[in-house]
Image: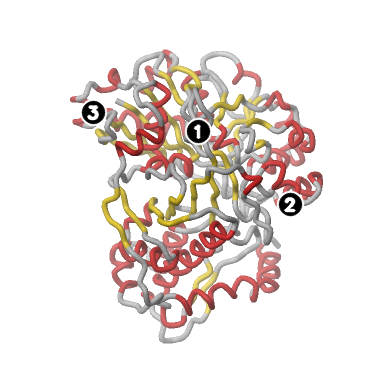
Amino acid sequence: MLLGIDIGTSAAKAVVCDATGRVLGTGSAEYPISRPHPGWSEQDPRHWWAGAVAATRAALASESAVRAGGGAAVAGVGLSGQMHGCVLLGGDALVGDGRDAVPLRPAILWNDQRTARECAEIEARAGGRAALVGLVGNAALPGFTLPKLLWVRRHEPDVFARTRLVLLPKDYVRLRMTGLAATDAGDASGVLLLDVDRRAWSARAIELAGIDPAILPRVVESGAAAGGLTAWAASELRLRAGVPVAAGSGDNQCGAIGAGVVRPGLALTTLGTSGVVYAHAEAPHRDLADPARPGRLHTMACATGDATRPGAWCVTGCMLSAAGALQWCRDTIAPGVGYDDLLAQAARVRPGSDGLAFLPHLTGERCPYPDPDARGGWIGLTARHERAHLVRSVLEGVAFTLARIMAIVREIGVPVQASRVGGGGARSPLWRQMLADCLRCPIASTNTEDGPALGAAILGGVAAGVLPTVEAACDAMIRQTEVLSPDASEPYAEAMAAHARLYDDLYDATRLLARLEHG
């Protein structure tokens, strides 16, 4: 069997499958998020480890997994995780078997917005945003890891002085598993210190940031083994000691593998807490320039490489509140009402929500507007609008934003003929058809619902030699189950055109509102 673990924002999820991709067991364990100040988002990394242990034990306890041999039959482990998090560790993390790797402070997460000042300094040191994008493939945005590290250096100098290792979330969990520090080229692309074309740390970027390169872990390909389970970790997880643990990758890269998006022409559109358009690309970032607004899209290494060959690349655009916007809407205006009921109400409203638009920028924004001070809201409210209109306009606002991201991907020369869909929001037939209509391409569901965790399991199989390559494994395991074609009448054309103007039209007002929020 193969085990994949996804360290998500709200929970850890584990999937146990066989070498054909048949899922034998799943498990999950939730953990809290701390928001001590407006715009801040933190977690205790030890909760990730506890969640990984609980989720793995639950997956192995399923009837099918027990019949297949339980933990003793697991031949490879892979990890996926929320990207860009900043985990700081002291010297004790560099010795021992990982069980005593205690973080120096809570991890700062991908959706934290406190680092606008540090982002401006990073871009200034590099000679501007375009120059930074040319150096590391990405602009300096608050969600990335390097700005968080520099924030700690400025505001918590005692913590920074004791830092001997910086890890990303899933890499911290692997450290607890193997006692070894490493990361993969895909997840490392979101640090702002990686030469994405070379898939290695950039000496120039490190020099400009003024940090010691010794605090960065080694970089390996996603499908390569980054260590083996220690006896202690194996006992905690109820697995065998020595089982190879793949480097794994970020949740976007692993989600793409779990959906079979490993070849040109395919994209993955994810309706998770955040919304992501991920397009596979064979060309490195130097050939994928966005001259209009450099940095709106992220050029990263994808997770198709292994110990014998490097992987390809990917282009992603991430909006920060997608299904998260729907959750906020439900919790705010309809607490206790089930999502199915709300979506059924929304389905009765005409496309365009009868003139009501929703801006989904509830936690700032990354793409198509790299702007931590972007704000959300309903525009066009009248007395005739009901709760159903509010909910449908949220679905549409997310779909319209993802459609603009897809348009940018195509504009820079990445061909997308079809997209597969993932994330919790993709369970809604209404939302899936809306995406097909707005993205103007077929939207396909697949036989796999476990996304990043399944992708991580495939990487674990490649690292263990159970599976030949990522691409071959995806060809054998993953198939399309439903394909929705766009409506030829383009029912959202006028509503999308109006929605596209709102960010610019309201820009000055949102600056004032952001100042009021921050006092």
Asked whether 403 or 280 is in front, the reply is 280
Q: Which residue is mark 2?
A: 130
- Tell me if residue 153 comes above or below residue 247 in the rendering: below
Determine crowd level at label 2: few under 14, some 14-19, many 20+ residues with C-alpha closer than 10 A. Answer: some
User: Looking at the image, which residue is at 60% across and 53% down?
Assistant: 297
Q: What amino acid does circle 1 point to?
A: Lys
Can you name the residue that lies furthest to the bottom here?
Answer: 383
Is tag 1's residue or tag 2's residue first in the polypeptide sequence? Answer: 2
Determine crowd level at label 1: few under 14, some 14-19, many 20+ residues with C-alpha closer than 10 A. Answer: many
The quarter holding residue 246 reads top left
Determine crowd level at label 3: few under 14, some 14-19, many 20+ residues with C-alpha closer than 10 A. Answer: many
Q: Secondary structure at mark 3?
A: helix
Image-based side of 170 in relation to 479, left or right? right
Instruction: Find the distance from the CA under tag 1 to the CA under tag 2.
Output: 30 Å
Is tag 1's residue or tag 3's residue first in the polypeptide sequence? Answer: 3
Mark 3 or 2, closer to the camera: 2
On-image quarter of the C terminus: bottom right
Instruction: Find the distance from the CA under tag 3 to the CA under tag 2.
Output: 50 Å
User: Looking at the image, which residue is at 67% across and 74% down?
Assistant: 509
Specify the label residue 170 is tagged with. 1
Q: Which residue is mark 3?
A: 65
Residue 12, percent from left and from top: 41, 38
Q: Secondary structure at mark 2?
A: helix
Q: What amino acid does circle 3 point to?
A: Ala
Q: What amino acid does circle 2 point to?
A: Ala
